[in-house]
Amino acid sequence: MQKILYVEMDVHQASIVIVVLNVEGKTISEAIIETMTETVRDFRRGLRGELHVTFEEGAQAAWLYDLLRPHATEVLVCNPRHNKLLGVGNKSDRIDAMKLAQLQQLTGAVARDTLLSEVQTNRQTRAEVLRAVVEHPDVDAVEYRGAFVAMQYFGYLRRDPEPDGFNAWLNYLDSHPEDFRTMVHGVMNSVEYRLRFGAP
């Protein structure tokens, strides 16, 4: 049986930051290569196993997808506007690649192959599978606080969060994991909220 490798790429015009993980989530390789056909091919040739590749949509996405698809079991192209996890916390190309890896590697009862099998054999509907993914503890651990903060902006301020405010509230909730009330109180008593909607 071939070993499974998760290849996560943070792609830029001049370079690609790559993190390769095994099925246990352990980093087995990291590299920074030039964004050129030959360097990507050379790196891919050095990987042995069943490759699951993930990178964000961008100017290089179509070219990279076409280059990698014939040699990988799966190539996922993420929409960065829908991936709030990448905007949260510390920023670096390596961290972005690691965050993509976290999202790709669900474990346990909601493993990707298990869920595909459930849908293909009509044992579960697509809605049931989606619910299983959304309610999985790995997804909850990665996404819940960020989703909560975003919903306070959408619900109370009726706008998208600005990065500095979003990260400040997320950092607060990371250090005070049970104190959601303070964040709600802070938004509802903010100058912006009071000027737009009056006192709560």
Image (cartoon, rainbow, N blue to C red):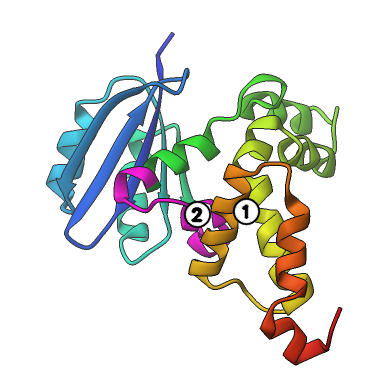
User: Which quadrant holds the N terminus?
Assistant: top left
At horizontal 67% and vertical 78% (from top left) the residue drawn is 159
What residue is pinned by disc 2? 88
| Residue at figure coordinates x 30%, y 57% from the top left | 63
Circle 1 residue: 146
- Would residue 30 appear left or right of 160 to someone viewing this image? left
Q: Residue furthest top?
A: 1
Q: Residues within 10 Å of mark 2 (few under 14, many from 20)?
A: some
Quarter-of-image position of residue 198: bottom right
Q: Examine the structure image and report whether residue 200 is included in the region drawn in magenta.
A: no
Q: Are marks 1 and 2 in contact (CB under 8 Å)?
A: yes
Residue 94 percent across, percent down from the top left: 31, 43
Q: Mark 2 belongs to which amino acid?
A: Val
Question: Horizontal and vertical percent for residue 154?
Answer: 72, 72
Relative side of 57 to 33, left or right = right
Three-letter amino acid code at disc 1? Gly
Instruction: Please give the range of residues in magenta.
Output: 79-95
Judged from the image, the secondary structure of the residue bearing numbered disc 2 is loop
Q: Position of residue 61 (x, y in %)?
A: 36, 58
